[in-house]
């Protein structure tokens, strides 16, 4: 399934609901929804986005997930049961993350700290190094586990999983996701399908 140009443009400015259960241990944070994501009403929904492939390669879900037409209730429940949550730094959908201004990122950073304090995940993974640097006033932050915590949680900052970001691959993201899951106490998913080793 795809979306027409008109459908994508109509999604501009929309938000995507957080995927959160009661026992979130590992919270992934996107920068903001892209137009495809807003149209599908599912996080990281664009077919070129590496998030879902990396989540599977890291062993955090037991089958490949395709969110390009929306996240199925079964897949949403799987993530919730495994203690995995997804939110965004900024709720407003744009065609590109660089359409966000610094004030939006700073406001989103403050709101994220409060959300993390309220939810109490063990680990937070922010997927957008540039957005993290601006939003949290950490201009020299490097990719990976951070020395500081966020709202009491262990913090990882990685590159954006968008297909437009040449600095991350499915493999680099999967390795970091697996490390973050270990720190969060999220075990590998059973029965990983044909790629299980």
Image (tube, grey):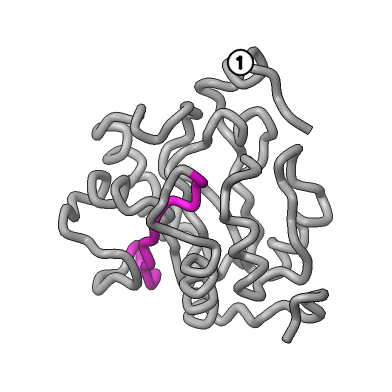
Residue placed at 39% from the left, 50% from the top?
Answer: 112
Q: Which residue is mark 1?
A: 10
Is 130 drawn above or below residue 168 in the view shown?
above
Q: Quadrant of residue 41?
A: top right
**Residue at left offset 48%, top offset 79%:** 179
The span shown in magenta is 150-163
Q: Which quarter of the picture shows residue 17?
A: top right
- Classify mark 1: residues with Cα within 10 Å, few (<14), some (14-19) or many (20+): few
Against 167, residue 98 (above or below) is above
In the rendered image, residue 58, in percent from the top left (x then y), is placed at: 60, 73
Magenta stretch encompasses residue 108: no
State the residue at coordinates (34%, 69%): 144
Q: Farthest top residue?
A: 6
Magenta stretch mostly in which secondary structure? Answer: loop
Quadrant including the N terminus = top right
Residue at point 42%, 48% (across, down)? 165
Q: How many callouts does the rendering have?
A: 1
User: Residue 87's spot in the image, x, y percent?
Assistant: 52, 48
**In terms of depth relative to the viewer, which is nearer, 103 or 9?**
9
Question: In terms of depth relative to the viewer, which is nearer, 164 or 85?
Answer: 164
Q: Is residue 158 magenta?
A: yes
**Residue 122 to residue 46: above or below:** below
In the image, taking residue 94 as reference, residue 61 lies left or right, namely: right
């Amino acid at each position: 399934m795809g979306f027409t140009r008109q459908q994508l443009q109509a999604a501009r400015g929309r938000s995507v609901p957080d995927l959160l259960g009661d026992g979130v241990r590992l919270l992934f944070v996107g920068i903001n929804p892209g137009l495809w994501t807003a149209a599908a009403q599912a996080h990281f929904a664009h077919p070129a986005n590496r998030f879902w492939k990396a989540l599977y390669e890291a062993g955090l879900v037991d089958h490949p997930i395709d969110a390009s037409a929306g996240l199925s209730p079964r897949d949403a429940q799987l993530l919730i049961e495994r203690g995995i949550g997804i939110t965004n730094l900024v709720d407003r959908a744009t065609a590109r993350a660089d359409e966000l201004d610094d004030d939006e990122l700073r406001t989103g950073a403050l709101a994220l700290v409060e959300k993390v304090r309220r939810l109490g995940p063990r680990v937070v993974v922010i997927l957008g190094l540039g957005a993290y640097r601006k939003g949290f006033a950490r201009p020299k932050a490097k990719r990976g586990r951070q020395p500081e915590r966020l709202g009491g949680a262990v913090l990882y900052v990685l590159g954006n999983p968008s297909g437009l970001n040449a600095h991350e691959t499915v493999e680099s993201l999967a390795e970091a996701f697996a490390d973050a899951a270990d720190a969060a106490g999220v075990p590998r998913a059973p029965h990983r399908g044909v790629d299980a080793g």
